[in-house]
Amino acid sequence: MSALKWIKGRRWSVGVAGLVAIGFVTILVGSGFSGCATFSTKPSDIQARFTARGLAPPEFIQQQTDPGSIHFISVGKGETTVVFVHGSPGSLDNFIRCMMDEELTQAARVISVDRPGFGESLPRKAVPSLEEQARQIYQALARNGVSGNTILVGHSLGGPVIARLAADHPEFVKGLVLVAPSMDPELEKRKWFNYAAKFPPVKWSISKDWGNSNDEIFPHKSELKKLAELLPEIETRTIVIQGMLDELVPPGNADYVERTMTNSVGLDIWRVEDLNHFVPWRRPDLIKKAVFEIIEKE
């Protein structure tokens, strides 16, 4: 084969691969593969949103951990700290409406983190281990002066992350708010686009956030099985907010929490009939209500 024929052949194969990738990505987008309504927002845009509301902008913090660092924003003061942990993919701005709630920020210090592998947290690659994610977030918070009396709020995959943190550091956590949490291993089903995103042309074409999301979703079932052994040991006050129209994380996950977190003090399941998966955007008032119920219950 001549060099010219080989080059033409390579161009043809690369062209086909590119068309396949474009087709897959188009279908992925149409299927809602992102799994989250928004992606990372620039700090300047976050500051602008606060300023437009007449609010002081949040503090942006890059807290060193072992390894890497956790990026988060902080606003407000109070004896209680509320920490928001997003789903997959996602970033700290997913809870921006709660962060701008003046009643909440007057009652507590409010923090929203970029989970490892997302936003500005380092390293940039996915960290599938729930234990390791929880360790890094805990370490960042502790090194920043957060010490106990903490309410953790986790959306979607952020739910099992905060549950793991509560299991490993019960003295640190005052309460948990699990928002549409992906908790039940038996309900964790890989979708066709999860497999498609492993196909090299598609993997090369999707964003870092989508790629990292896929890399942590693939082993998530096995991670949830590890967490299952610890859930009965969690005594922390827990509220679950579950939309009954959720097509991304089945409502059965709330039933699973009810069956397994049997030692949680005052476990409460809020099943909302007309709500889907995107609680932080559609019903931030429910999250606020849950946080205040924990703050006010001594």
Image (cartoon, rainbow, N blue to C red):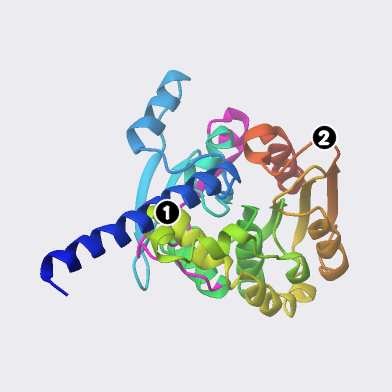
Indicate which label's residue lies in the foreground, 1 or 2.
1
Image height check: is 141 above or below 153? below
Disc 1 on helix, strand or loop?
helix
Q: Is residue 126 left or right of residue 273?
A: left
Q: CA distance from mark 1 to mark 2?
A: 36 Å
Residue type (three-letter) at the residue carrying disc 2: Asp
Q: Quadrant of the N terminus?
A: bottom left
Per the rendering, the mark at residue 274 is 2
Bounds of the magenta segment: 100-129
Point out residue 5 in the picture as x, y percentages from the top left corner. 17, 66
Q: Residue at x 77, y 58 (%)?
A: 237
Magenta highlight: main SS: loop
Q: Nearer the viewer, residue 272 or 33?
A: 33
Instruction: Check disc 1 and report the residue beneath it.
Output: 21
Res. 144 in view: no
Q: Residue at x 42, y 61 (%)?
A: 203
Q: Nearer the viewer, residue 257 or 50?
A: 257
Q: Sequence-wise, which precedes: disc 1 or disc 2?
A: 1
Residue type (three-letter) at the residue carrying disc 1: Ala
